[in-house]
Amino acid sequence: MSALLPLVPKILHPSIRSSRYYAENSQALVIQADESRKQSQNLNACFDKLTSMIAEAGRAAVPGETSPEQKKKVQKLCVVDTEKTTKVIKKTTANRYYRQKAANEARIRMKKAHSNKKSSRKGRSDE
């Protein structure tokens, strides 16, 4: 049990302890199979029983179907989320466009100023 319980969700622990395979004296799971004459096949059968026992405990402990009200609530939340995301994306895209445009205009102004400075030096002739 000490090796199995850390691997299984805590919600399943009571179900496993109340299982027909649980031995209280030794606090262990005792699963046996004698379906075959081969030890490996019996070992696989024991693992199958253990797997089905854990799966059954999970079905009993974990709630089943989602109610229609809960499904509607989640769908509404998803719609609101996508609307907000779309608005943020549009706003971000617009901001990026204006930032790029402003940066490009500033770059062009700097180039023109640099060009004017160089051309003003060329125009001088001290003759």
Image: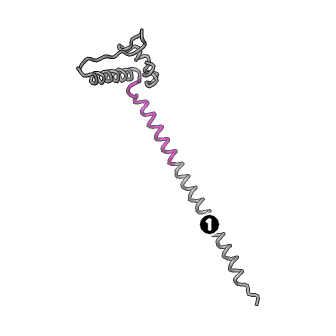
Q: Label 1 crowding class (10 Å Cα cut-off): few <14, some 14-19, many 20+? A: few
| Residue 109 horizontal side relative to residue 86, left or right | right
Q: Residue at x 65, y 73 (%)?
A: 112
| Residue 103 horizontal side relative to residue 39, left or right | right
Quarter occupied by the N terminus: top left
Q: Residue 38, located in which quarter of the rendered image?
A: top left
Query: What is the span of residues highlighted in magenta in the rendered image?
Result: 62-86
Q: Residue 60, located in which quarter of the rendered image?
A: top left
Q: Position of residue 32 (x, y in %)?
A: 31, 16
Q: Nearer the viewer, residue 105 or 81?
A: 105
Q: Position of residue 116 (x, y in %)?
A: 68, 77
| Residue 101 horizontal side relative to residue 56, left or right | right
Whether the magenta-drawn stretch holds residue 78 is answered as: yes
Q: Give the labeled residue for mark 1.
A: 105
Q: Nearer the viewer, residue 53 or 82?
A: 53
- Kind of residue at disc 1: Glu
